[in-house]
Each structure stands twice: as structure tokens, then as C-alpha cells.
Amino acid sequence: MELIQTISRLRSELDKLRSEGKTIGLVPTMGALHAGHASLVERAVGENDVVVVSDFVNPTQFNDKNDLAKYPRTLEADCDLLAKCGVTFVFAPSVEEMYPEPDTRSFSYAPLDTVMEGKYRPGHFNGVCQVVSKLFLIVNPTRAYFGEKDFQQLAIIREMVRSYPFNIEIVGCPIVREADGLALSSRNARLSGGERKQALQISATLFASLDYAKEHSLAETKRFVEDRIAQADGLRLEYFEIVDGNTLQSLGEWNESDYVVGCITVFCGDVRLIDNIKYKG
Ligand code: PAF
């Protein structure tokens, strides 16, 4: 495995391999890797001849400077994990390398990017599309891998690939959870022991709502989740929406769609956690 920090070096290595007919898998990450990332990487290693993992905390997708400053940075440990997974290249550029000048490109995929995270984190998905499109242009992968935990991000990236158009297969990978249900996230590292216990109520509530939904309307199920989170110690709900899994628009009744997903964002202390659950589809 080789650690590469410049675009030109990564390009020249990949050009050689591509000319030999090798397939290239890309796993974009912001580092602070955990078993959720490892599952994406292992899948990419199994499906491609060459695997590039980018490890770059992208400043343009943070609308909150504090959140950017506090984002964990663990490149050395990340490289140890990636070497064990059989990755070919880790691409860890500096901010200046990725953005030698400000990126003024603007991406808009309304109404996919105006709801939920788009509403509460203005500019976030624009920044995600800026960095992911740059990575796609640099790496030109055969396939790129993203986790379903960031459900809205995955839908927007699929739309960007369709409309750009990029000739890249987007592979969505299931959420990886701790044994007790907590969805893996780099942000979990910022939870204290007590907060970690409180955060368990998020996945526990989503799982309980699966059963509740069998006997109740969509509006009742939404209220069930909202009330349980409101009553849980240490948690503050930002939003819970039950949406069509393709359009991401809120639904009024279960029978309005065959693909129904509940998306939640909760603050535990000052750590913002997201999760989701599939009701149908
Ligand atoms: O999901 C993430 O970690 C980031 O949004 C991504 C896709 C690596 C872009 O910075």
C-alpha cells in the first residue's frame, strides 16, 4: 500500500494501471476510519483490481467551523487499518492540493438537497459534491462506494453521477452497527461514556418504531419516534422524517410509496448523530 499526497502522482499511477485494463474502486472518506469504513473497503477490494481510499477532511462541506475543527484526524491509524484490508493507494492530499483556489462550482439537486440535512446544514451537500466530483475526476474509478448511513448523501451522489454524467457505478453499502445497535460513525469517538449510553436510544427507538409501524399510521409512527427521543435523557431531536427512499420527500401515508425510509438527526451533547431505518422496500 502506498500513501500518496499529490494529484499528479496518483493520476500517473492510475493511468498506468488503467492502461493495463485494471478496474479501479474508490472509497471516499474523511478518515477517522472504523469498521463501517472497513466494510466499504473490503467490498471494494473484493470487486476491483485496484482500490484507492481517499482520506481528506473536506472543509467545503462543513457549515460549522467548530465541527470542522473538532473532526477527528487519525491518518496513521487509518493507514494501519487500510494496509490490513489490502488497499492499493491511500490518497491524503492537503487542503491546498485539493483547493489551490476556492471552488466556486455550485451543485443543486433540488428537491433532493433542500430537505433534511440540506435544510439544517446549508451548503453541506454543495461541498460534498465539490469534493466527490473532484475525486471522481482525479481517480476516474470504475466503481465508488458509499455508506447508506448517509442516506441523503448517497441519493444526491447517485443523482450527480446520473446528471453530470460520470461513467461510474455507485455502490451503496448497508449501515454497520455496534452489537448494541449504535450506528458506527467517526463522530462516536467524541461521545463520553455517558453520552454513548444515551445515544443508544436513537437506534433503539428506530428499531422499536419498526414494530410500532405495523399497527399504526405513518403520522403516529413519526410522533412515536419524536416523543421517545424527546423523553430520552441527553438527546435533542433535530428532525425525524419518513420519506420516499428515492425522492426523499416526506410522506403522509404508508401506501404512498413502496420504498419508505425514516431519517433521523439527533444531538447527543454537542455531537450531531444521524441514522436511518427502512420501513418498506
Ligand atoms: O461521507 C463522508 O465521509 C464524506 O461526506 C465524503 C463522501 C467522504 C466527502 O467528503
Image (cartoon, rainbow, N blue to C red):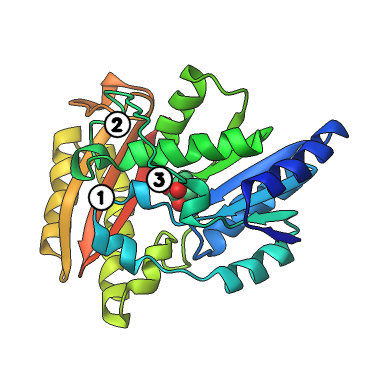
Residue 171 seen from this side: no
Q: Quadrant of the N terminus?
A: bottom right
- Residue marked by disc 1: 63
- Residue 273 lies, in percent from the top left, at 30, 58
Residue 12 shown left or right of residue 40 in the figure = right
Q: Residue flagged by tag 3: what amino acid is it?
A: Asp
- Residue 104 lies, in percent from the top left, at 35, 33
Residue at the farthest right position: 20
- Residue closest to the eye, 146 or 72: 72
Question: Comparing marks 2 and 3, which lies closer to the viewer?
Answer: 2
Q: SS at mark 3? A: loop
Residue 2: which quarter of the image?
bottom right
Q: Residue flagged by tag 1: what amino acid is it?
A: Asn
Residue 134 seen from this side: yes
| Label 2 with label 3: CB-CB less than 8 Å | no
Disc 3 residue lies near ligand 1 with CB under 8 A: yes
Q: Residue at x 28, y 21 (%)?
A: 255
- Residue marked by disc 3: 150
Residue 166: which quarter of the image?
top right
Residue 213: which quarter of the image?
top left
The disc at residue 113 is: 2
Q: Quadrant of the C terminus?
A: top left
Residue 51 shown left or right of residue 146 in the figure = right
Q: Residue at x 32, y 22 (%)?
A: 257
